[in-house]
Image (cartoon, helix red, strand yellow):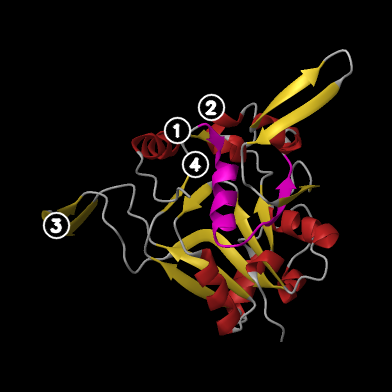
Amino acid sequence: MRNVEPIDIPVLVLCGGLGTRFREQTEFRPKPMIEIGGRPILWHIMRTYAKHGFKRFILCLGYRGDVIRQYFLHYASMNSDFTVELAKNDLRMHTIDHTDDWSVTLAETGQYTMTGGRVARAAAKFLGKAEHFAVTYGDGVTDANLSEEFSFHLNHGRIGTVLGVNPPSRFGEIQLSGDEVLKFQEKPEFSEKWINGGFFFFRREFLQYLSDDPGCVLEQTPLVQLADDSGLSLFRHHGFWHCMDTQRDYDDLNRMWTDGTAPWKV
């Protein structure tokens, strides 16, 4: 088999959810466009992939997809100095103030389509002949080495690989003997309890597990069946991972960025 490089791998980013659990931030914009340090969390996610050589993105749009379209249509002008000759309707760009050499495809996948249906619809139009592809959500950041995860995926030969993370509990843990407290621990880390970190790699065969039906949920039948078929590997990540589901998450991530302690910063 020919050598597969990150630059050849399409990264499908799920950007179309309604964000109902975070309505104070998502009423007028999709969740991936909520800003950390003045940049959409989507930008942070894409920067992480690009750091490891993955620069071909397919954004799966749905709710308020127009906001994401406008962001990338005007990406150069929003990150550069320019002059507009109003009488001539002429735009002259000066030095472009970014180094993001990405290919970004914006794919409409339906207002109410679920995650599996979005992947299936975008892949049908834009995956081309790619033998492998990546999938992630538009609301989580990490310092995981994604190139190592991809190498792990290739070497293990299974259809899919998921990044496994074990973040600390949001709540304290109390261990009891009857009514006696044996152990009290605030927000413990569960080192052997792995959860879905949302950074996937798949072989093309995974498309057989998906449907373009709007009700197809990636995390339900497709991944459950793939695991039952012994087709899914776990790449363990012990470092930083954080999703943005609540105002508290938003505040925490922005505080890290402001303090200069953001582990995911490229």
Spatial CA span between label 2 and label 4: 11 Å
The three-letter code of the residue at mark 3 reads Lys
Q: Mark 3 near mark 1, Cβ–Cβ under 8 Å? A: no
Q: Which residue is mark 3?
A: 183
Find out whether the residues at labels 1 and 2 contact each other: C-beta distance under 8 Å.
yes
| Residue type of the residue flagged with mark 1 | Gln
Pick the residue in front: 102 or 212. 102
133 falls in the magenta region: no
Counting labels gives 4
Disc 4: which residue: 245
State left or right for residue 261 relative to residue 17: left
Measured in 3D between alpha carbons, the distance from the residue under mark 3 to the one under mark 1, in whole angstroms, is 30 Å
Where residue 128 appears, x then y in whole percent? Answer: 83, 66
Q: CA distance from mark 1 to mark 2?
A: 8 Å
Q: Residue at x 79, y 63 (%)?
A: 127
Please indicate whether residue 155 sits to the left or right of residue 205 in the image.
Answer: left
Amino acid on which the number 4 mark rests in the picture: Asp
